């Protein structure tokens, strides 16, 4: 059946929610990345799990590729339909289905956004902590990329906060994984298999999530340093002391200059800076903050500046979340490539200071901003609008990844593989582990219809 006939067949149950409209196909031709865009043949806006089952059965039967889509905020070409086919947009599956206050969990449809969920939970005294730099991303997309954010050092990533899933398999069958219990030793952990599978194994339509109580006391502070090394040594010492910081983020002097200008931050200089947040009882949060400040001063930190009012805290963390946009505004006409290396905590200074040397040698501008509490840092490589700009940027990206791998790290702490990181996987995991991953893909998606060309080189 040619793809036009498949679209006509899908129209019988989707009506005009499957469309070949050029503007909508263009919108779904890329994510937030520098990969060349490719238009899908059609975009299907599904509203129920049953519609996903019917569409997948059809695409599987006709061997037509399917690319699941949440909000298209991924950074590695994940959503580009490089082999055409249907983009399956889940953004209209956006209902919060159930919230249990006593069990501190909830069930949501895949298209619920991070921001929408937290607005829904606020009055219940609960929150969902995983907070990528953009709040418009969907819980389905965050599950599929195994996303994290500034709170991961205390509350974990999607890997830790997804308890169970409803998944439409490549051939249209429906399964439920996991459940609502805090632990289970019953069978293979299919939930963890689908979390991070980037739409290559199935379509996630519902997610059971662990929630957390909004802490009684929250305090935020910044601490500036004269050197990047001192800032990173402070982070390592805080982690090794076991101080349960909720957030601990590093911005180098270039990123600080960009953020000060973009977010109109006052009282801060363009110096390496740590952003902290402490959660707990008033006494507990104050104790953590005191211990962290003492360590920072021991590494020549220039003192803690407190953001105590809710509005000041919000401004500070919004500035951190806007770091990518601040970098783009800092260098007008440039594109951005965000590296995502992660290393064991004790190797962070080698990784970050090494990256600084690579950046200097490249002649490119690349602010560093990172979830250093996890050993994860991004360099936002500014791609100059020159013929060899992209090639130079990718060369720098490769050097940073190579060093992270040599230090026992990973090419991606949270953004995922998509197209951009495929070439590093074999080096990171080894040929035998890659063969096992391929065997899993082959078993679950024997016709290769689920987001083909992602994670694996071919
Ligand atoms: C400014 C900025 C800052 C960012 N900061 C962070 C950060 O701090 N931490 C972080 O982790 N990420 C960050 N990201 C990346 C991004 O937000 C995540 O990758 C996000 O998790 C993707 O969600 P989405 O809904 O946009 O998914 P999409 O981009 O639409 O899809 C991502 C991948 O998941 C698949 N997918 C989507 N929905 C489903 C589904 N329901 N079932 C199966 N597969 C699906 C897609 O096929 C694709 O492979 C940032 C991005 C931007 C633009």
Image (cartoon, helix red, strand yellow):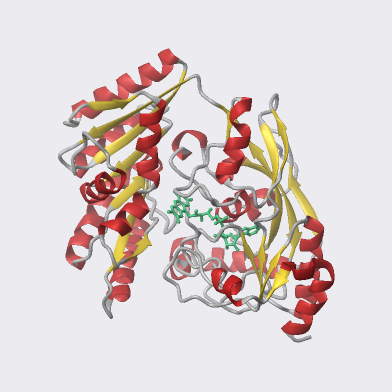
Q: Residue at x 37, y 21 (%)?
A: 288
Residue 369, position in %: x, y? 32, 48
**Horizontal placement of 318 versus 446: left or right?**
left
Name the outermost residue toward the bottom.
Answer: 2
On the picture, is 442 further left or further right than 340? right
In the rendered view, tell whether residue 165 sits above or below residue 331.
above
Depth check: give the residue in front, 389 or 233. Answer: 389
In-image side of 399 versus 30 (left or right): left
Residue 167 percent location from the top left of the image? 73, 55
Note whether 62 is above or below 407 in the view shown.
below
Describe residue 293's horizontal placement relative to residue 378 as left or right: left
The answer to whether residue 407 of the structure is visible from this angle is: no
Please identify the residue farthest to the top as the structure is shown: 283
Residue 321 drawn above or below residue 9: above
- Percent across and percent down for residue 357 are 19, 58
The quadrant holding residue 235 is top left
- The residue depicted at 40 percent of the width and 34 percent of the height is 314
User: Can see residue 262?
Assistant: yes
The answer to which image quadrant residue 169 occupies is bottom right
The C terminus, quarter of image: bottom right
Residue plotted at (70% across, 24% down): 102
Q: Position of residue 180 (x, y in %)?
A: 73, 36
Q: Nearer the viewer, residue 125 or 340?
A: 125
**Quadrant in which the N terminus appears:** bottom right
Q: Give 354 or 381, whichever is nearer the viewer.
A: 381
Residue at far right of view = 12
């Amino acid at each position: 059946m040619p793809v036009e006939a498949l679209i006509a067949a899908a129209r019988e149950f989707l009506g005009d929610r499957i469309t070949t409209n050029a503007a909508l196909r263009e919108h779904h031709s890329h994510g937030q990345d520098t990969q060349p865009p490719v238009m899908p043949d059609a975009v299907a806006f599904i509203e129920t799990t049953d519609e996903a089952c019917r569409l997948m059965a059809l695409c599987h039967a006709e061997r037509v590729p399917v690319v699941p889509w949440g909000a298209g905020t991924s950074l590695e070409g994940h959503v580009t339909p490089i082999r055409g086919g249907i983009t399956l947009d889940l953004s209209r599956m956006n209902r919060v289905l159930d919230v249990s206050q006593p069990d501190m969990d909830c069930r949501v449809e895949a298209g619920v956004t991070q921001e929408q969920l937290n607005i829904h939970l606020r009055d219940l005294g609960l929150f969902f902590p995983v907070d990528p730099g953009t709040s418009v991303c969907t819980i389905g997309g965050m599950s599929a990329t195994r996303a994290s954010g500034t709170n991961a050092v205390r509350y974990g990533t999607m890997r830790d906060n997804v308890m169970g899933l409803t998944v439409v398999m490549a051939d249209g069958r429906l399964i439920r994984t996991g459940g609502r219990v805090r632990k289970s030793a019953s069978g293979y952990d299919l939930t963890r298999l689908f979390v991070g599978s980037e739409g290559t194994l199935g379509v996630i339509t519902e997610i059971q999530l662990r929630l957390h109580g909004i802490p009684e006391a929250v305090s935020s502070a910044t601490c500036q340093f004269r050197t990047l090394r001192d800032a990173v040594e402070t982070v390592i010492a805080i982690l090794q002391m076991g101080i349960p910081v909720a957030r601990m983020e590093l911005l180098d002097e270039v990123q600080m200059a960009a953020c000060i200008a973009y977010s109109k931050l006052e009282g801060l200089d363009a110096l390496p800076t740590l952003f902290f947040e402490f959660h707990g009882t008033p006494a507990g949060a104050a104790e953590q903050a005191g211990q962290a400040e003492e360590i920072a001063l021991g590494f020549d930190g220039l003192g803690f500046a407190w953001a105590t009012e809710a509005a000041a805290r919000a401004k500070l963390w919004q500035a951190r979340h806007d770091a990518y946009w601040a970098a783009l505004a800092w260098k007008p006409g440039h594109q951005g490539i965000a590296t995502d290396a992660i290393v064991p905590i004790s190797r962070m200074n080698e990784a970050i200071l090494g990256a600084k040397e690579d950046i200097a040698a490249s002649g490119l501008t690349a602010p560093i901003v990172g979830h250093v509490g996890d050993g994860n840092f991004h360099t936002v490589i500014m791609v100059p609008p020159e013929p060899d700009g992209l090639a130079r940027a990718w060369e720098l990206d490769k050097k940073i990844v190579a060093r992270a791998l040599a230090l026992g790290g990973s090419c991606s702490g949270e953004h995922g593989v998509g197209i951009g990181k495929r070439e590093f996987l074999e080096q990171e995991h080894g040929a035998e582990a890659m063969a096992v991953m391929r065997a899993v893909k082959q078993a679950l998606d024997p016709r290769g219809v689920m987001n083909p060309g992602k994670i694996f080189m071919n």
